[in-house]
Image (cartoon, rainbow, N blue to C red):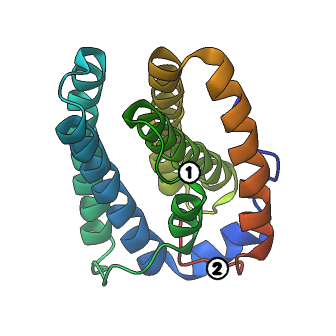
Amino acid sequence: MLGLQLPTDPRWVNLAEKSLEEILTDHAYCEQKAATSCISLIQAYPERVELVRELAPIVTEEWGHFRLVLQELDKRNLNLGKQRKDEYVNALMSFRKKGGSREERLMEHLLVCALIEARSCERFRVLSLHISDDELKEFYHKFMVAEAAHYRLFIDLAKLYAGEDKVKVRWKEYLDYEVEIMKNLELRGDRVH
């Protein structure tokens, strides 16, 4: 369903499990940035009624996810650490086409969001299946389901505003580029991406 062409290395779960405070910290900030990204889209495109209508509740949901991760940290007597640079997201952002029409920039932003949500969904699925802690399996299963819905929403909004043909071509380019990102990133257990 997600279209990702390179699955997460199975060793990532073992690394994440050894760095639980760090992975939960990174996850918390990912949720916070997702909410902020939706707010930015709404601010930049207030005339896009469907976008505003669809993303406004996602802002609330993503902020709720941030709070859930904070609760999980508290429950485990772990601390929220400092936010770190997200090399994966920065690499995706560098692939966005510069310039172009306002509509093309919107499509690029929506596709980056979709890909981030798709990879998050895939990573949360891996955690929900393979982490040894049963509570965390359930915790991450819920996030996996939410991320899948967000991925689909961003793709649907891109198709609505840019057209299915343009999105199909550009999405394939993003998926191909994402493989290279994944091959070149160091396998780290302290990052969601």
Q: Which residue is mark 1?
A: 97
Front residue of this view, candidates 38 and 139: 38
x and y percent of residue 115 in the render? 58, 45
The number of callouts visible is 2
x and y percent of residue 37 in the render? 31, 49
Q: Residue at x 25, y 64 (%)?
A: 70
Q: Quadrant of the C terminus?
A: bottom right
Q: Is residue 169 left or right of residue 103?
A: right
Q: Residue at x 32, y 58 (%)?
A: 33
Q: Which residue is mark 2?
A: 188
Between tags 1 and 2, which lies in front?
A: 1
x and y percent of residue 38 in the render? 29, 42
Front residue of this view, candidates 2 and 105: 105
Residue type, numbered disc 2: Arg
Front residue of this view, candidates 147 and 21: 147
Label 2 crowd bin: few (<14), some (14–19), many (20+), radius 10 Å: some
Q: Residue at x 79, y 64 (%)?
A: 180
What numbered label is drawn on residue 68?
A: none
Residue 120 shows up from this direction? yes
- Which residue is situated farthest in the front direction here? 100
Residue type, numbered disc 1: Lys
Give the vertical position of 126 relative to 147 (above or below). below
Q: Quadrant of residue 80?
A: bottom left
Residue 64 shows up from this direction? no
What element does badge 2 sit on? loop
Give the vertical position of 22 relative to 176 (above or below). below
